[in-house]
Each structure stands twice: as structure tokens, then as C-alpha cells.
């Protein structure tokens, strides 16, 4: 989503300026055109040449450099920007932006732009907590600026407190989210599940499955990038929490049921990518079971069918991982769980399914229409699924839409 976007990155004089290099690099890798403007103080921490090498673009540092002709360039940058990101933002630049000053390349660009502005504060905790800085941040917020961070943690001064530059991944998420405001799921709330539930046998063992969680995480990130507010109910997996997404970690199917029913209230859509165990041990041993006889029978009882149980959510999307009779089984689940869409996945296909980064799936809707998709990345599958969710949500606004099933 960042390709063809112009991000103007305003770097100011904080030790965290080196982290802006990483940000510029990641934005560039994602296809954005990154135009960097630096205050004179920022150039004391990182050389403009570093940003130039990373972005492949000239870096604007001096208002009066006749070679760059910034007096024209800053207006051009301000106009070309799809988003302006001031990162790191010192207490000084925050004060000057709040006052509408235009005496360096960064605040000049901010003053001139009509694009959304994201500010990532980084400073000493005392400066951040000072009533003047807090007041300036409030003023910026009131004018529609987005404030990312700061984080709480170890500061360059040696102390610990608020004022630490937000993690680059979080800032990237904020940028995607701000840019995503113009796309399909802005203002929507989406609930996603991921991972494979683990049903305990005793304190050390469980009944589980091979789900990696990658599909659900890809959907959560894609929905976030389309501007949705996303809640992810995650069964155990080894993936890090996606930035900008509310993550609720659960273990067992019954815990997932509770979390999903609670989080579903007020959501526009549920996409249930989790591999929920169908059975759980009838009795969970409180102490570690010792080995004994040559054979052991484990009695299992059914878990709740979460997707079938969730009612009242406008759009429900399910997944069907099948090893045979793909379409017949998927259609039966679509009907039985009252779904708008089911993503049918033949797990026997090479390079597709559990643990893989790719999937070859078919999408089946309420009308029974089947779309066979080629092998693609899980993120691409996620985009296809969300295209459908967007269409369904748009159709719901037109009263003629009738449920078929
Ligand atoms: N699902 C659920 N609760 C369960 C089992 C499954 O919510 N107890 C959801 C899954 O997240 C998925 C869909 O239902 O979106 C289909 O899951 P799947 O395991 O393929 O089907 P089951 O209904 O469990 O049927 P079966 O195991 O017999 O294929």
C-alpha cells in the first residue's frame, strides 16, 4: 500500500535520529518515495548523505541553500506529500509546530502541507512531562496531528520514563493506518482469529494442531492497513504481535469462544482463521501424568463451535482446511455456520496450507459462487478476502441485499 506514496520524513535533533534511517529504509523497501527534510540539529546526529543513500533522493537541510532552492522545494514537498512524518520530534520542534513557526525546513513543510502529519516525540522524560510540552501536544492533536508514542523505557539520558522514540514497526503501522484512512475499511471494526488452540491433557501436554497463525495475522495486518480497527484473538503461535492491532492471547477453544463472543460486540466483520480443536480432553489432570500401562485411552469431548455460535455480526468469514472433497465440505460449513464467505484450502497441495507462506484457496460465497485463486502469498489471500468483506459491507448499506442460504 505504500507504493506510489510520497512520505516526507522530517528529522529533528535527537539521538533517535539514527532510528529514522531504519524507518526511511523500510519505507523505501515498501515502495514509498521518501523525501527527507532535516533540521540543522538533526545533521549533527546523522549525516544527510546517509538518508540520501538510503532513499536515493536529495535531502533538504538548509532553507537558504541556493543549490536546492528550498524556498520552492519546501512548498513542492509539502504539496507532494501523502503524509508528513516528523520523527524523531524534539520538544523544540513540537513547540515550534504548535506555534505555527516556519524557520526551518521541517516546520516550514509542516506548516505548508495539507497532508496528514504524524509526530513521533523523542526526548528526555522531564521535557516530555513538562506542562508546556504536554500543552503543545494537545494543541497539535486538536488540530488533527497524529501523535505516535512516545514509548516508556530507557532513555539516552540514562533514566527510565516516557520519551523514548516509538518502535519503528509501530510507526510504520501508524503511517499505513493514516494512509489507509482513504481506503475501504476506514471506520470499520474487524475481529480476526488466528493460531491453533491447545487443549491441555495435564500441566505439560496438550492436544494441538499445526496451525502457524500466519493466515490470521496476515488478515489482521491487511485489515489494519485498510484503515480498520482490528482485534486479533490469537491462539498459541510464535508470531510477534502486529503493531497497531489489539491482540488478545488465548489458549484453549473455550477461552477463544469467550474472547470472541466478548470482542464480537459492535464489530462489522469476523474472519475466523484459527484452527480450533474440535475435541478437548474430558478430564485435565492437575499433576503431570506418569507413564504406566502399555496403552492409554484419552477420552475427548467436543468443544463449542465458535463460528456457528457467533450471531449478530454483519459479516462472517470462515476457513475450511480440507484433505478431501474440498468444495462439498466447504459448502456444508458455509451453510451450517451461516457464513458470508468461506475460504476453502486443500491442505494436500504442495506449497500450500499449514506453516507455509503461500496458499492456494477457493472463495465460496453465500450464493454458491466459487472463485479459484492461484497459489499466492497469505497476505495476497488476505487482500482477496478483505476485498470481499469490503464489498459485502458496502452492499449492506443498500436495502435490497437479502441473505440467501
Ligand atoms: N471453527 C470454530 N469452532 C470450532 C471449530 C471450527 O469456530 N470448534 C471455525 C474455524 O475457525 C473455521 C471454520 O469453523 O473458520 C471451519 O473449521 P474446520 O476445522 O475446517 O471445520 P469444522 O467445523 O471443525 O469441521 P471438521 O473438523 O469436521 O472438518
Image: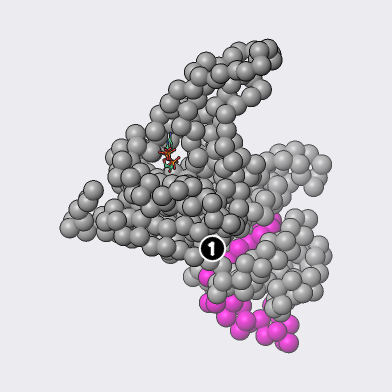
Q: Is residue 24 above or below residue 229?
A: below
Which residue is at 60% across, 17% downward?
Answer: 296
Residue 137 location (% of width, % of height)? 57, 51
Image coordinates of residue 200 in percent, x first then y, are 57, 24
Q: Residue 155 or 205: which is nearer the viewer? A: 205
- Identify which residue is drawn at 64% across, 54% down: 169
Q: Secondary structure at mark 1?
A: strand
Residue 63 at x, y = what percent? 69, 77
Does label 1 point to a residue whose CB lies under 8 Å from ligand 1?
no
Circle 1 sits on which residue?
A: 376
Closest to the observer: 94 or 268?
Answer: 268
Q: Nearer the viewer, residue 102 or 6?
A: 6
Q: Please identify the residue farthest to the front as the structure is shown.
A: 294
Q: Residue 63, relative to residue 83: is it above or below?
A: below
Dot 1: few (<14), some (14–19), or many (≥20) neighbours within 10 Å?
some
Q: Toward which corner of the image does residue 8 lie, by quadrant?
A: bottom right
**Ligand 1 occupies quarter:** top left
Q: Image check: 44 left or right of 378? A: right
Is residue 30 in the magenta section? no
Q: Residue at x 60, y 26 (%)?
A: 206
Q: Which residues are magenta?
A: 63-91
Q: Nearer the viewer, residue 292 or 355?
A: 292
Amino acid at each position: 500500500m505504500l507504493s506510489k506514496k510520497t512520505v516526507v520524513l522530517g528529522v529533528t535533533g535527537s539521538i533517535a535520529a539514527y532510528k529514522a534511517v531504519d524507518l526511511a529504509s523500510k519505507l523505501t523497501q515498501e515502495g514509498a518515495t521518501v523525501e527527507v527534510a532535516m533540521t540543522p540539529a538533526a545533521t549533527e546526529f546523522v549525516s544527510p548523505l546517509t538518508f540520501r543513500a538510503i532513499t536515493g533522493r536529495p535531502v533538504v537541510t538548509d532553507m537558504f541553500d541556493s543549490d536546492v532552492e528550498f524556498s520552492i522545494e519546501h512548498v513542492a514537498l509539502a504539496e507532494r506529500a501523502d503524509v508528513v512524518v516528523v520523527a524523531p520530534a524534539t520538544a523544540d520542534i513540537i513547540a515550534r509546530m504548535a506555534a505555527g513557526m516556519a524557520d526551518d525546513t521541517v516546520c516550514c513543510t509542516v506548516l505548508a502541507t495539507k497532508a496528514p502529519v504524524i509526530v513521533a516525540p523523542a526526548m528526555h522524560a522531564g521535557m516530555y512531562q513538562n506542562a508546556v510540552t504536554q500543552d503543545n501536544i494537545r494543541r497539535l492533536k486538536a488540530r488533527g496531528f497524529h501523535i505516535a508514542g512516545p514509548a516508556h523505557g530507557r532513555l539516552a539520558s540514562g533514566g527510565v520514563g516516557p520519551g523514548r522514540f516509538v518502535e519503528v514497526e509501530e510507526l510504520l503501522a501508524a503511517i499505513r493506518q493514516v494512509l489507509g484512512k482513504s481506503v475501504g475499511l476506514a471506520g470499520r471494526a474487524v475481529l480476526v482469529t488466528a493460531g491453533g488452540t491447545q487443549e491441555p491433557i495435564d500441566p505439560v501436554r496438550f492436544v494441538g494442531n499445526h496451525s502457524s497463525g500466519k493466515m490470521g495475522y496476515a488478515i489482521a495486518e491487511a485489515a489494519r492497513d485498510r484503515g480498520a480497527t482490528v482485534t486479533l484473538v490469537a491462539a498459541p503461535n510464535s508470531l510477534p504481535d502486529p503493531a497497531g492491532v489489539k491482540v488478545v492471547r488465548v489458549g484453549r477453544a473455550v477461552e477463544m469462544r469467550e474472547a470472541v463472543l466478548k470482542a464480537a460486540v459492535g464489530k462489522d466483520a469476523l474472519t475466523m482463521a484459527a484452527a480450533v480443536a474440535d475435541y478437548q480432553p474430558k478430564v485435565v489432570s492437575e499433576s503431570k501424568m506418569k507413564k504406566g500401562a502399555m496403552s492409554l485411552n484419552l477420552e475427548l469431548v467436543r468443544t463449542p463451535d465458535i463460528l456457528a455460535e457467533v450471531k449478530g455480526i454483519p459479516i462472517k468469514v470462515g476457513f475450511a482446511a480440507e484433505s478431501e472433497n474440498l468444495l462439498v465440505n466447504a459448502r456444508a460449513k458455509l451453510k451450517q455456520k451461516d457464513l458470508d464467505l468461506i475460504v476453502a484450502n486443500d491442505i494436500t497441495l504442495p506449497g500450500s496450507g499449514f506453516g507455509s507462506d503461500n496458499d492456494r484457496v477457493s472463495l465460496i460465497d453465500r450464493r454458491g459462487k466459487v472463485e479459484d485463486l492461484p497459489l499466492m502469498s497469505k497476505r495476497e489471500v488476505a487482500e482477496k478476502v478483505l476485498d470481499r468483506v469490503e464489498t459485502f459491507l458496502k452492499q449492506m448499506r443498500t436495502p435490497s441485499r437479502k441473505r440467501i442460504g
